[in-house]
Amino acid sequence: MKRLIPLSFMALSSLLQADMAIQEFLYKDARIMGAGAANTAVGGYSSSLFYNPAGLINIKKSHGVEVELLGLSVTSSSKTQAFLNDISDANDTEVIDVVKKYSGDAFNEDVANYSSFSYHTDSNIAYSMGILASGDINFIPHANEGTNGLLELHARVYNGITLGAAYKLENVLEGSLTLGVGATYMQQKSYEVGLTESEVLQHKDDLATYIQDTYEVDNSGFGIDLGLLYEPSFLTFWHPSFGMSLMNIGTLNFADVYGAQPMTLNFGAAVSPEISWLDALTVSLDYVDALNAQQMRIRNYNPYYSKDQYDNANIEFDMLQHIRAGVSAGVIDNSWFLLTLNSGLYQGSYTAGLDIQLTVLKLQFATYQEQLGSQVGQLEDRRYMVQLGIGW
């Protein structure tokens, strides 16, 4: 019997998707997260479509057509495995004690795949199309069954398609100006609940099924993304660039249920100085969600309508949670091997990452810390990410 509860948690972690922190982007790329998630003025990847579609123009022409048949990523919180191990070793009478032992800790499990096709043509046009599927669960145990119950769960699963294009105009304002546009269609199932002690015990054998049947909310939405990228022709050693993106224009707010993607306005600046002993070096700084569209979620418990337990609250996030900064150093980049080192600052905490590509095999690592409360340090979750790709 004691093995059934951890199996329920694992079933949930393979089924659901969520992010309790600021959700300004639909997809987190390990290469970008390792560099502080500051990509508004950088680009260079097919996944730049989720940050600023104009950044597609920086996909290297020398790479030709870029195909990622597999872009599988797995993310986990630092304490998740310890929690699952303790649950696995506990008998029925000890389960609640284990939950209370980890009271106030935040846990995350995430699995995502983004497969894409991208091409930077010889006529200053770049485009990309992709398919995204993601599954994730976030939960927080509570020692005392208060407003958020014994086990607070925020989760969703979503999938859909993305399209994007960028066009560079030369000789504009003493430089070049790239215009970008993207389109996204997503389907989502969200799950948000504060489970009581009686619910956990009563449904310990089928917890995942119970949550699906009781708290699942279906939504779908369509969004348009617009982006600009300006690269002045002066200061040629530094190669500065400035970006702006307006993301999720449309119905990706999913009627303000959990997992909604509000329209966000983002700004970024970057420099790419020429360093003789490096293949490439980029230093970037972003300010995301300038309109403060992101909302905290606060429980408004209604026992007669279980699907409407959490609502958006008009509470702004700390300024530091809007700031992203990153450094990306390309050590080697040739036709058969690529090595890039990344580091940065994300929501006030350090990030680090490694990008390795060997012919058709791509392997990336990243760590970052989510701020899950409205203030930095209120509730933190250090996460580790591994991404495996197959493409060319």
Image (cartoon, grey):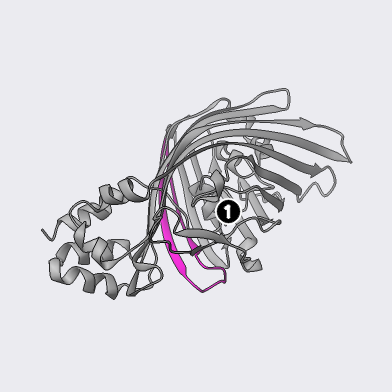
For residue 238, side relative to residue 156 (left or right) = right
Q: Position of residue 141 (x, y in %)?
A: 34, 68
Decide which of 333, 366 is in the foreground and name it.
366
Residue stretch in magenta? 361-389
Task: Give the amino acid type for the residue marked by disc 1 in the picture.
Answer: Ala
Decide which of 212, 19 is in the foreground and name it.
212
Can you name the residue that lies furthest to the right here?
A: 173
- Inspect this view and state whether residue 75 appears: no
Residue wearing tag 1? 37
Task: Quadrant for residue 87, please give it.
Answer: bottom left
- Inspect this view and state whether residue 47 appears: yes
Decide which of 340, 76 is in the foreground and name it.
76
Q: Is 143 a magenta residue?
A: no
Decide which of 375, 215 is in the foreground and name it.
215
- Quarter of the picture containing the N terminus is bottom left
Q: Position of residue 131 (x, y in %)?
A: 48, 32
Q: Position of residue 339 (x, y in %)?
A: 50, 46
SS for dot 1: loop
For image coordinates 82% across by 49% down, the residue present is 235
Can you name the residue that lies furthest to the left here?
A: 1
Q: Mark 1 Cα within 10 Å, few/some/many (few <14, many 20+)?
A: many
**71 vs 74: above or below:** above
For image coordinates 62% across by 50% down, the residue present is 277
